[in-house]
């Protein structure tokens, strides 16, 4: 199996996993995060497939998943019900972290060996997005695991403007 086939298979597997997490999520915001991540993985697949077919590497549009996740998690701070709900998903998030870490290592390995500058730039962009995906899932995992570490949650969630 060549590198393109491996990369496309990896992207589809991760996309399927994110679609499953989105379908299993009881929180609409978290469902949206995983839906955005699945969409990113599909775009990665499409870019790799185009490159495999001999087309020049197309430029990927920057993902909006990180900004959306920041907003969604920001809204959840102070919501103890959301944190308790997310605690039920810790194992799934831990697995998603492993999947993203594997993707990062995979693309780093490809980049070390690639010599075509145009292809290398697209692969570097995908690598950057995979690192962002790891960051998103890591923050979601941390939020679910340690809600007491958030200052606004632990000490000031009961304060109101006077």
Image (tube, helix red, strand yellow):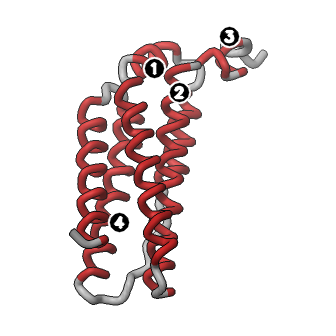
Are circles 1 and 2 on residues that touch, CB within 8 Å? yes
Q: CA distance from mark 4 to mark 3?
A: 43 Å
Q: Quick one: which residue is furthest to the right in this view?
A: 162
Q: Give the CA separation, mark 3 to mark 1.
A: 16 Å
Q: Earlier in the sequence, mark 2 or mark 4?
A: 4
Horizontal relation, residue 114 to residue 77: left or right: left
Tell me which label, 3 or 2, sits earlier in the chain. 2
- The answer to whether 12 is drawn above or below residue 24 in the figure is below
Which residue is at the front of the view, 54 or 33?
54
SS class of the residue under badge 2?
helix
Disc on res. 158: 3
Per the image, the residue denoted by label 4 is 44
Instruction: Measure the alpha-carbon separation of dots 2 and 4.
Output: 29 Å
- The residue indicated by pointer 1 is 82
Residue in view at x 30 percent, y 49 percent: 14
- Sequence-wise, the earlier of marks 1 and 2 is 2
Residue 1 versus residue 56: which sits nearer the camera? 1
Mark number for residue 76?
Answer: 2
**Corner quadrant of residue 1:** bottom left
Q: Is residue 46 left or right of residue 89?
A: left
Find residue 77 and report its horizontal and vertical position in percent: 58, 25
Disc 3 to disc 2, C-alpha distance: 14 Å
**Where does residue 105 sit, x and y in percent of width and height?**
47, 56
Which is more N-terminal, label 1 or label 3? 1
Q: Earlier in the sequence, mark 4 or mark 3?
A: 4
Label 1: few (<14), some or many (≥20) within 10 Å? some
CA separation in Å, label 1 and label 4? 31 Å
Residue at 24 percent across and 35 percent down: it is 23
Q: Is 107 drawn above or below residue 52 in the view shown?
A: above
């Amino acid at each position: 199996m060549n590198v393109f086939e491996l990369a496309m298979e990896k992207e589809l597997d991760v996309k399927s996993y994110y679609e499953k997490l989105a379908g299993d999520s009881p929180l609409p915001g978290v469902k949206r995060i995983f839906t955005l991540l699945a969409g990113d993985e599909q775009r990665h697949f499409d870019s790799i497939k185009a490159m495999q077919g001999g087309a020049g590497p197309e430029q990927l549009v920057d993902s909006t998943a990180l900004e959306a996740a920041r907003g969604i998690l920001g809204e959840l701070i102070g919501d103890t019900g959301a944190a308790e709900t997310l605690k039920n998903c810790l194992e799934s998030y831990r697995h998603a972290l492993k999947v993203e870490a594997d993707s990062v290592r995979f693309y780093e390995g490809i980049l070390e060996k690639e010599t075509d500058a145009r292809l290398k730039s697209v692969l570097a962009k995908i690598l950057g997005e995979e690192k962002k995906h790891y960051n998103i899932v890591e923050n979601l995992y941390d939020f679910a695991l340690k809600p007491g570490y958030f200052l606004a949650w632990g000490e000031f969630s009961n304060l109101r403007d006077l």
